[in-house]
Image: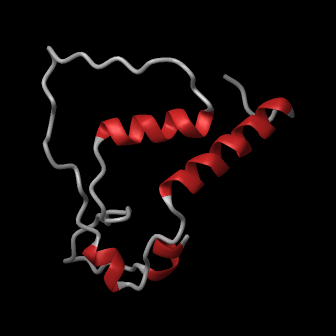
Amino acid sequence: MFALEQWQPGPDEQQFLNVGTGVDLAIRALAEAVAEATGFQGEIHWDASKPDGSPKKQLDVSRLAALGWQARIPLAEGLTDTVALFREQLSLQLARL
């Protein structure tokens, strides 16, 4: 909502805005955080025969920061809250798999 309310690019400006924390996060760390938030007890398997992809996936969020926004909810908390909301909506049949 913040970006929709605060960002009005002119016709000659870039028409995209990166939204994120500006902190780099490895895919492994993200997978482990999702597993923790969901209570996943299994094992995460990595296919080392596949390319690693881009070594750095950190977004440049300087344009968003210049508007005055910064992330204030830690990733683990946001994941936990999102999983809880999804599970609640699933139990109320407001979401489905």
Total numbered circles: 0
Q: Quadrant of the N terminus?
A: bottom right
Q: Position of residue 84 (x, y in %)?
A: 72, 43
Quarter location, residue 39: top right
Vertical side of 40 occupied by 81: above or below = below
Quarter location, residue 32: top left
Vertical side of 8 occupied by 88: above or below = above
Q: Position of residue 16 (x, y in %)?
A: 29, 64
The color scheme shown is: secondary structure
Vertical side of 76 occupied by 44: above or below = above
Q: Residue at x 38, y 84 (%)?
A: 67
| For residue 87, side relative to residue 59 (left or right) | right
| For residue 6, side relative to residue 96 (left or right) | left
Q: Position of residue 36 (x, y in %)?
A: 55, 37
Q: Quadrant of the C terminus?
A: top right
Q: Residue at x 25, y 59 (%)?
A: 59
Vertical side of 66 occupied by 51: above or below = above
Nearer to us in this view, 35 or 3: 35
Q: Residue at x 19, y 77 (%)?
A: 12
Q: Position of residue 25 (x, y in %)?
A: 30, 50
Q: Residue at x 53, y 52 (%)?
A: 76
